Amino acid sequence: MPFPAAIAVLFRRVEAATLIVILVIGAALWAFVALAAEMLEGDLHAFDQAVLLALRTPGDTANPIGGRGLEIAMRDITALGGVTVLTLITALVLIFLILQRQRATAMFLGVAILGGQMLSHLMKSSFSRPRPDLVPHGVDVATASFPSGHSMMAAVTYLTLAVILARAEKKTSIRAFYIVTAAFIAILVGISRVYLGVHWPSDVLAGWSLGAAWALTVWIVARMMARRGQIEPDRQG
């Protein structure tokens, strides 16, 4: 079969939604690679510094804008991307899936979340970017800065949980609610990391990009496995 004809057959077999997701994954990975390259060359320093200082009271880098109340709120929000909260939420969803007799899906979800966590650690150790020293840190940190682990794992965990739960939901509006809520939480977590001075903005952008790419890849793999009967089928109505 000629190459153009083979491509046409492939496009007919793949759903439009899947093609769109593949394109989004490619764009997210491109964004991560571009950010990593710019970061290594030092071209993001001016941008990172400007955003970080914009979130501080002029003349006092130790005082974030918005007052004490907003600072406390941001500390609460940043905990949503921490290991303890993410592990607890993942465990609860796994239990829910098991009670729903979706054991294969539960196992797949557990592997997907653990895989995302391993990828996050691998990226951090590969780049070893120092944490910002421009402003005081609002919370304690111990690991490298690029990409933001909280931002990436919030995107990985919440978006992955959302796409898995959405598979078991018939109503499109509820499916959309899952995805939008997950994305909103991941965005808030990333913003909180910059606000608290523990990450450069580019760290967060990279974490979001890689985390979203991982979660969307999980969605595609889940659809493929469901069609082969390896996990429970999608209940889209």
Image (cartoon, rainbow, N blue to C red):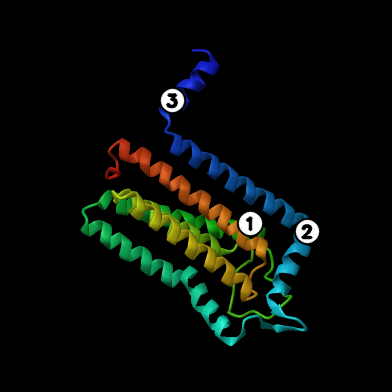
Tell me the crowding category of disc 1: few under 14, some 14 to 19, or many 20 or more residues within 10 angstroms, Cα based.
few
Q: Amino acid at mark 3?
A: Arg
Image point 61% across, 57% down: which residue? Answer: 206
Image point 36% across, 56% down: which residue? Answer: 110
Which residue is most to the bottom? Answer: 68
The residue where tag 3 is placed is 12
Tell me the crowding category of disc 3: few under 14, some 14 to 19, or many 20 or more residues within 10 angstroms, Cα based.
few
Residue 7 is situated, as x and y percent measured from the top left of the image, at 51, 22
Residue 207 picture quarter: bottom right
Tell me the crowding category of disc 2: few under 14, some 14 to 19, or many 20 or more residues within 10 angstroms, Cα based.
few
Which residue is most to the front? Answer: 173
| Helix, strand or loop under label 1 | helix
The tally of labels here is 3
Q: Amino acid at mark 2?
A: Gly
Residue 109 is situated, as x and y percent measured from the top left of the image, at 36, 53
Nearer to us of marks 2 and 1 is 2
Q: Using residue 179 as the reference point, say whether residue 203 is left or right of it.
A: right
The residue where tag 2 is placed is 42
Q: Quadrant of the C terminus?
A: top left
Image point 68% across, 53% down: which residue? Answer: 35
Q: CA distance from mark 2 to mark 3?
A: 44 Å
Q: Amino acid at mark 1?
A: Ser
Would you place residue 78 above or below residue 155 in this image? below
Disc 2 to disc 1: CB gap under 8 Å: no
Can you tell which mark lies on residue 126? 1
Q: Earlier in the sequence, mark 2 or mark 3?
A: 3
| Helix, strand or loop under label 3 | helix
